[in-house]
Amino acid sequence: MFVAVQRWELHLEGAHSLKDRRSVLQRLKSALRRECNVSVAETGEQELWQRAEISCAVVGSDRTVIEGILRAADRLVDGADGARIIATEVTWL
């Protein structure tokens, strides 16, 4: 069994309030769940308007398949409106 967690630090350039921030993150988390079938949560920087940290987790029996899912998730986050990736990290458990 393989478990991978990918973490993204994001800059939310258009967020001028917590409501703006929440809107961007909700769309992004929903898209990750729907299109990549991953577990996703906001994991840090929750008090700042223009910064966010989200993480997703994938569990499977084939490392190659998991790597493909993580690449797809990374492309989705990279193309998200209103969010720019500052840093990303993958941890294998």
Image (tube, rainbow, N blue to C red):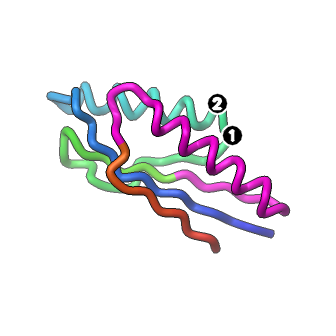
Please say whether residue 18 is one of the residues in the magenta stretch.
no
Examine the rendered structure and indicate whether residue 39 appears above or below residue 26: below
Judged left or right of residue 17, residue 29 is: right
Expressed as whole percent of the image width and height from the top left, the position of residue 26 reads 43, 30
Expressed as whole percent of the image width and height from the top left, the position of residue 27 reads 45, 27
The residue shown at (15%, 28%) is: 16
Find residue 37 and name its label.
1
Helix or strand or loop: what does disc 1 sit on? loop
Please say whether residue 75 is one of the residues in the magenta stretch.
yes
Q: Which residue is mark 2?
A: 34
The residue shown at (63%, 50%) is: 70
Examine the rendered structure and indicate whether residue 93 appears above or below residue 38: below
Image quarter of residue 58? bottom right
Q: Foreground: 54 or 9?
A: 9
Helix or strand or loop: what does disc 2 sit on? helix
Expressed as whole percent of the image width and height from the top left, the position of residue 3 reads 69, 65
CB under 8 Å between discs 2 and 1: yes
The residue shown at (54%, 35%) is: 76
